[in-house]
Amino acid sequence: MTNQTILSWFKPTWQQLPLIDKANFPQSVLLTGKQGIGRNQFISQLIQLLLCQSVKTSEEGQALACGQCQSCHLFTSNNHADFYQLKRLENKQTLGVDQVRSVIDWVELTTTLNHGKVLFIAEAEKLSISASNAILKTLEEPPENTTIILLSEYEKQVLPTIRSRCVHYLLPSPDTHQAREFLTNWYTNAKIEIDSTQIDVLLKICQNAPFDAIDLTNSNKLEQRKAILNAMKIIALSNGSPVHEAKELMKLMKKEPLDYIFYCFFTMIIDILKLQNLGNHKHVLNIDYFNELNAFSNLISQYRQKSQIFSIYDELQRYFEMTVNPLNAQLLLESYLIKWKNCCLNS
């Protein structure tokens, strides 16, 4: 069943939404907010409410789904015929025009429970140009009792023609206190022993995104993060082979994508640049690796290789802007680590 408790940092946005009288709810909505802050929970709660046959009001005056009606039961069991989520096909980098045309046909169908329909597009920034053009008219004039919800991390990632046809609401990130309180309660309920210092480090790493912090502790991502740091240390301080270290990282990852490895490498490069330019730990993201990152910063400054590290930064930034993943991720990793070695050489 969908959790009906609105996360504390989302309450102002929830209160902005005209939910008491669903007839006033805009038919085309763009929600934006960073990953890892609970967006999926918020959107699930919103969609369930929009489809609910008997909306209730909380003690705080918030409209909430009843959780008991036929529509709520169908939604929470993933069997609601009046709800459709448009997702990228496996191994596709964009939402294609054929997918959009199919969903437009669905939008035109009559509702099954006479309480409206909801279309959810989870990665609005992934709509191809042709797909975006295909859905414009539907966004501008959706069928009666139909709501279209689009989600993206940042508003500017979405094409202006799409943005202009939607009402925009921001999903704010929690502040440090809200994120720490949520995580403390979550770990307590999950019976996971973790102290406040560890929670603060996790939140620093995840930039106050508590669901990303939970993901870190429930996966092998902390191991991956440690592995890329060790590879950097071996290459920089022990004259290690970038090709060998890339192979070791590939063994660790098995067949998983290298996105998180590249992300960790990118944030560590940014931290090194911060240390070189600001000279203190205040803005360092990977605060638990401060000593190692500071050693890298001093080494690169000593050998005057700042241009090399900026080159790595630029290439990693371009990687995250790619719409198509590279054919050979290992070769790309090797090239980044070779450049990293060049940063740490006395040329």
Image: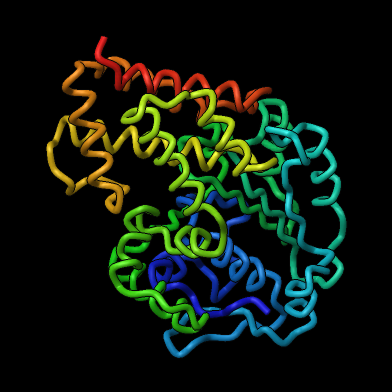
Residue pictured at 75% horizontal, 52% vertical: 143
- Taking the image as shown, residue 196 lies to the left or right of residue 136, namely left
Residue pictured at 66% horizontal, 23% vertical: 328
- Within the image, what quadrant is residue 220 found in? bottom right
- Taking the image as shown, residue 124 lies to the left or right of residue 230, namely right
Residue 155 in picture, x, y percent from top left? 47, 41
Q: Quadrant of the N terminus?
A: bottom right
Residue pictured at 22% horizontal, 31% vertical: 297
Work out which residue is located at the far top of the displayed protein and give it: 347
Count the numbered circles shown.
0
Check the image and report above or below for 164 versus 346: below
Work out which residue is located at the far bottom of the displayed protein and give it: 59
Residue pictured at 76% horizontal, 61% vertical: 83
Check the image and report above or below for 243 versus 8: above
Residue 27 in picture, x, y percent from top left? 63, 55
Residue 329 in picture, x, y percent from top left? 61, 27
